Each structure stands twice: as structure tokens, then as C-alpha cells.
Amino acid sequence: MSSASTSTTALDVTTSAQADNILLRHDAQGITTLSLNQADQFNVLSMQMLDLLIRELESIKQDPSVRVLIIQAEGKAFCSGHNLKQMRQNPEHQYQLELFTRCGQFMQALLALPQPVIAKVHGIATAAGCQLVAMCDLAIASEHAKFAVSGINVGLFCSTPAVALSRNVGRKKAFEMLVTGEFISAQQAQEWGLINHCVAAADLDPTVQELALKLCRKPAGSLAMGKQLFYEQLEQPISQAYAQAAQVMADNMMLADTQEGLDAFMQKRVPSWAQAAS
């Protein structure tokens, strides 16, 4: 789906989710917005929703016209995590393993996406919903948003959300959230590093749009290379991280946009990117 025109559609899928339009896509100005659209179920990450999200991320990954992805939700909640009713209706171990594996595949697909991903959080984000916020590259939340990894309250330790949470929040704060299941406010989430900014509800849309457009004006190739390096080096010993970073910076220097940027800086003019939205 091209971002050259503005459109909002339900995804063309052949699953049982098709009639429900549980995931919506909107494209405009190089920005793609995916909206979780199950307000009556607090936008749960059901197996169907995960399949749709993975499929759409693969489409976005291959589409150079998409410069930034925003993930948001309809209704009162951002995302309440997995569909507990669906999980209880499928008690087999194999089903549970497939569900959590599929969720992990989706979360890792967010990191593998060359485009920056912004979570726009207007309401509660719990369990896998909090995990989703943590796995997005950037996150902006309304002052009314709340965050929790509350599985422990029903006897299910949020092990998969812990992977994302512990990579965003300090170790002791993350563990406290995991073992108490208690909510933290958007202001706390900002202070703890789970989100970038906490804003007034009325400012959420324009703040996210401003950030997305700002990223659209950066050279796509450099952003993609930088994002990949950022996450890979976090998991490496420092010597290996520096070696890879040096290689990436040398590769980055070979990009036409980078050479244009350096020339523009020295010539005291605005750069004209080949890979940036106008």
C-alpha cells in the first residue's frame, strides 16, 4: 500500500478476523499507522491479531515509501495483553508455546523493521501490551495511560514481557513491576525509561505526528543502518560492539545521502536527501 495517497482500510485477510476489521492501516505523508481495533476486548493480542501484525510488518519492511510506523489503538485501552479466554479454551501446552512464540516473533519483527516504530499510548498497556510498548523504538503516552505486567496477579509470571521490560527499565524497577503486577503512571514510565514522553491527552496526537514527520525528514538509509546497529550492539561485548559500529559507520559514509549531508554542512546549506520524505 503506497503512502503517496491517504487511505484507511481493514487489511485484506482470509482469517476469521476479516469480518471484524480488528487491525486497521492508514497511510499518509510517508507515515503508516496500524490501529488495534478491538475496543470491546481491550485490543488483546490474540493469535489472529498477532498473525495480522506479523503479516503487515513484513509488507511495511519491503515498502520504501513507508518512512515511519505508528502503532496505536482504538477504544479506552491501548492493549491489555493476550486473550485470556482464548488461552483457557486451548489448554494444550503446544498451543500455549505457539502463542508465546508467535508473540516473540512479532516483537522481534518490530526490531528488524528498518523504519522507526513509535507507540502512541492513550490508555492502559498491560502484560504483552506493556511488552509491545517496550519493544517499539520510541513511545509517547498520554498522561492518562498506565502500564503494568500484571500476569502474576492470575498466577502467570510475565516471562516474555520481562525480556522487553528488562531491556528498557532498570533491573530492580523491572523486577518490582513483574512480581507485584502493580500499575505505574505514565509519568513514572517516563522517569523509568519505558516511554520517551508523557504528554497531556490533548497533545498526544500532535506530539506523535510531529516526531513522525521529523523522522521522515531524515535519510532512510542512515536510519535503517543505525537502528540495526543500535539493537545488535546492545547484546555484544564492548569490543565486538565497537568493531561492528566502526564497520557500520564506514558503510554509512559510503551512502550518497551521507556525502550530501557532509557537503551541505560544509557549504552551510540545507541538505537535499534522496531518501527523505518532502
Image (spheres, rainbow, N blue to C red):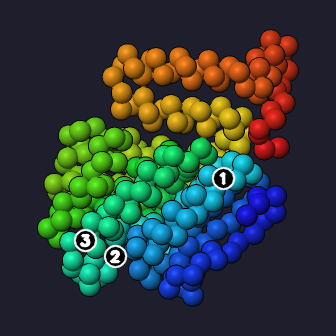
Marks 2 and 1, Cα distance to the nearest angstrom?
A: 30 Å
Say if residue 248 shows up in the picture: yes
Image quarter in which the C terminus is found: top right
**Which residue, given by chain and number where applicable, does mark 2 sit on?**
83
Amino acid type indicated by mark 1: Gln
Q: Secondary structure at mark 1?
A: loop
Residue identified by numbered label 3: 94
| Mark found first going from the N terminus, 1 or 3 | 1
Q: Quadrant of residue 236?
A: top left
* Percent coordinates x, y for residue 133 in the rendering: 43, 54
**For the residue marked with disc 2, what is the amino acid?**
Asn
Kindly identify the residue that appears in the image at 50 percent across and 51 percent down.
Answer: 110
What residue do we see at 34% from left, 48% from top? Answer: 164
Left or right of 251, for residue 128: left
Classify mark 2: helix, strand or loop.
loop
Relative height, residue 226 to residue 110 (above, below): above
Q: Residue furthest front?
A: 94
**Closer to the observer: label 3 or label 2?**
3
Please name the amino acid that badge 3 sits on. Gln
**Dot 1 and dot 3 residues touching (CB under 8 Å):** no
Badge 1 is on which residue? 62
